[in-house]
Amino acid sequence: MADNLICGIDIGSSKIATVVGVNSVETDELKIIGFNTTTARGVRKGLVVDIKEATGAVEDSVEKAERMAGHKINKAFVAVGGPHISSLNSHGIVAVSNPQGEINEEDVQRVVEAAKAISLSSTRRIIEVIPRDYIVDGQSGIKNPIGMSGVRLEVETHIITASSTNLKNQERILSDLGIENQGFVFSGMASSEAVLTNTEKELGIVLVDIGAGKIDLSIYVDGALSYSSSIPIGARHISNDIAVGLRVSLDSAEKIKIFLSKSFDGKKKTSQINLKELDLPENLTEVSLKTLVDGIVAPRLEEIFKLIFEEIEKSGFGQQIPSGLVITGGGALTIGMLETGKRVVGLPIRIGFPEKISGLVDEILDPQYSTTVGLLLYGINNDFNDKDNFKNFGKILKDFKLGSSINNLKNFIKQFIP
Ligand SMILES: Nc1ncnc2c1ncn2[C@@H]1O[C@H](COP(=O)(O)OP(=O)(O)OP(=O)(O)O)[C@@H](O)[C@H]1O
Ligand SMILES: [Mg+2]
């Protein structure tokens, strides 16, 4: 059987990243064969604000990734995030079709459909439906009800919705480039696929993706995604603060910020930082570490973590996340991130780097590409169909992967695909 080619496009606020991977059928290993990152244009806080500019940037990135991979990208999974994302948990209930027999795949599909029947304004669209827990005749905690006997089947689902206008804009970009959209994936969820362990998800954890323009949050409880949201602030705000505080351009501030996080671990006792090697146009050659870290960066990080803390409180899952926080996204590497986070949130924190891949591109093993890598990992579990509805049903199937019925179930679903 041929290996599967799988592609992902992350249209971020600071960069467009395109990745092409091959999922080996024999070894079940995901190998990156094409990758490109291009400076973003026409995107702000996860929203397309200039469709022509954004299309041009995506085209550049896609073409370069295609050239590297030696394959044309005809279809791709696409990340969406930002404050236009919201989520809710919905309950579905159905009578089992054959109460004398066993619960079958169709019952599961019906109960999830029942949970999806939420009132939604015409400006919103469901992008993900995740079954968190099944309940059979009042007994909860069931991950796979197929084959069980019962008369009443219930499901607790997590539903992620997005602004339909923004989705339409992204679809337009893809169709202009002749790329078929295999599905929108919430970027916080994609990043989780790349950086979280199953144990962390089981114990309860918060994934925080700090991008340039926004922070995406995914909370996992009992192994299932239970809360998704986004905060309209990002690592670009830290660069802005440095630009204002040191009276330099945003470009120079960005360079200083990256230099700082790469050169100092926060423990070094240097009072002055030598900036000569950055060759800044402002001729700034030295700056006080204390001014920069304690005076400019730390207060913004503190604000960011307070907002994250408030969001966790708002979710109602604050008492169910003993694994704490995993911070990823490019902003995760900001100097002082872990120290400030631990102090403000009071939970264990680690930085999440993308894992579970191999290939020739080391550059991709950086927190800013967690979403990008996650798109491929997500795609592997959903690549047997392209239709929106069935994509969601692919999520349901994922939970049954350990069960022996997976192939039967896939074949069952495939019957319905035109
Ligand atoms: N080594 C580093 N140290 C500090 N900050 C960094 C580092 N690398 C990247 N960043 C910051 O991370 C941000 C970019 O992160 P990322 O690539 O995850 O954002 P994005 O996906 O383009 O944006 P978004 O997710 O908000 O749409 C930039 O603000 C950049 O300054
Ligand atoms: Mg991002």
Image: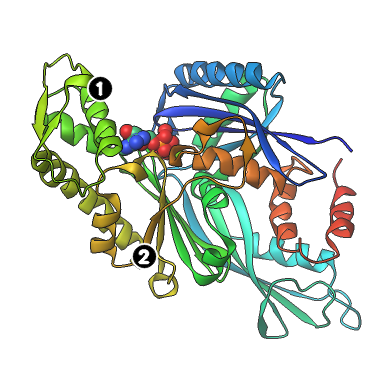
Query: Does residue 376 appear anywhere in the picture?
Result: yes
| Quadrant holding the C terminus | top right
Q: Quadrant of residue 131?
A: bottom right
Residue 251's label in the rendered image is 1
Q: Provide the residue designation for mark 2.
A: 348
Residue 50's label in the rendered image is none
| Quadrant holding the N terminus | top right
Q: Is residue 311 above or below residue 146?
A: above
Q: Is residue 162 left or right of residue 386?
A: left
> Mark 2 belongs to which amino acid?
Pro
Q: Report how far apart the C-alphas of labels 1 and 2 lie in the structure.
A: 33 Å
Q: Is residue 192 above or below residue 164?
A: below
Q: Is residue 95 left or right of residue 342?
A: right
Q: Secondary structure at mark 2?
A: loop
- Label 2 crowd bin: few (<14), some (14–19), many (20+), radius 10 Å: some
Q: Quadrant of residue 212?
A: top left
Q: Is residue 226 left or right of residue 65?
A: left
Q: Quadrant of residue 155?
A: bottom right
Q: In the image, is the residue at mark 2 within 8 Å of ligand 1 by its beta carbon?
A: no
Count of all numbered marks drawn on residues in the image: 2
* Colour setup of the view: rainbow
Q: Position of residue 340 (x, y in %)?
A: 24, 55
- Label 1 crowd bin: few (<14), some (14–19), many (20+), radius 10 Å: some
Q: Position of residue 194 (x, y in %)?
A: 56, 48
Q: Residue at x 69, y 55 (%)?
A: 395
Q: Residue at x 80, y 68 (%)?
A: 107
Front in this rendered view, residue 254 or 28: 28
> Mark 1 belongs to which amino acid?
Asp
Is tag 1's residue or tag 2's residue first in the polypeptide sequence?
1
Q: Residue at x 53, y 22 (%)?
A: 58
Figure quarter occupied by ligand 2: top left
